[in-house]
Amino acid sequence: MRRFLIAGNWKMNCGPYDAAELLEGLTERKAEISEDVDVLVCPPFVSIGMAVKYLYDTDIQVGAQNLHFEENGAFTGEISGSMLTESGCNYVIIGHSERRQYFGETDETVNKRVHKAIEHKLAPIVCVGESLEQRQKEEHFELVKNQVKKALEGVSEAEVRDVVIAYEPIWAIGTGETATPEQAQVMHEYIRTVLSDLYSEEVADQINILYGGSMKPANAKELLSQPDVDGGLIGGASLDADSFSEIITIAEELA
Ligand code: PGA
């Protein structure tokens, strides 16, 4: 059975000092987490060490927001999979729409990063999702299908079981606008069908599909109640210890 995954994407927020404060607030509120829910924070690279230090004896895991697809070498400014594993990460976000939009990431580089993450035993959280324009033109299903297929090219059935997909409609990210629970469910169900066609129904049933885009305590219950919504990738609301803890509690109650 799938377990809820509640993941905080801190984006470019919280250097080590602010990270310590946020983590302290979070661990005060959520010293123990139900075993039916996985919780993860993804700080910026420079705060990963602080997060690992604060969270080592808690149930909260640490992930990164990106990795490079080469092993090491002359790639100024980049971070490799082995560096993340060595730093204590066990997840990594890949292909977030902000990376695709502002940093030239493509389906091809997303796929290379997915392979690198798997090689280093980092569970990839692969982000997919359409823009408002693409939705209005009714291209969203085709687009998301292609993003999923290309991200997973060459990924075996054994490997894909650890992959997480995050459906993040671009029009709902950081805008306060959320997909309705029905819109989320329809797309999540569709993604599961795509996974089932690529692998098998049994495999598709095991893969976590998170929703991302202005998830907050006020809408988390409805979103997480959808049968194919297996958790959230949470930006803004993960920067506030109260809000993030509340979402975790909602997931625990639904689990
Ligand atoms: P948001 O961000 O919750 O602030 O909309 C989600 C994300 O981009 O991962």
Image (cartoon, helix red, strand yellow):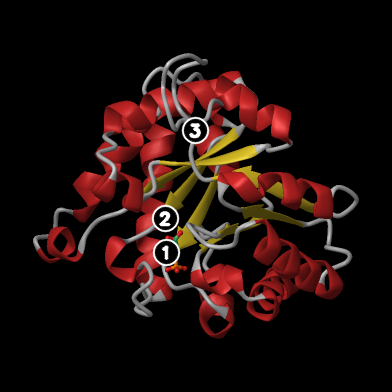
Picture residue at 66% right of the left edge, 66% below the top: 18
- The answer to whether 23 appears left or right of 97 in the picture is right
Depth check: give the residue in front, 239 or 215.
239
Q: Does 98 sit above or below residue 219?
A: above
Depth check: give the residue in front, 241 or 108.
241
- How packed is label 1: few (under 14 Cα within 10 Å), some, or many (20 or more)? many
Residue at the disc numbered 3: 67
Q: Position of residue 77 (x, y in %)?
A: 44, 32
Disc 3 residue type?
Leu
Q: Secondary structure at mark 2?
A: helix
Residue 198: image tag: none
Structural distance between the alpha carbons of marks 3 and 1: 29 Å
Q: Position of residue 235 (x, y in %)?
A: 50, 65
Q: Residue furthest left?
A: 137
Sooner in the amino-acid sequence: mark 3 or mark 2: 3
Picture residue at 40% right of the left edge, 65% below the top: 184
- C-beta proximity under 8 Å, tags 1 and 2: yes
Quadrant housing the C terminus: bottom right
Mark 3 or 2: the one toward you: 3
Residue 188: image tag: 2
Structural distance between the alpha carbons of marks 1 and 2: 5 Å
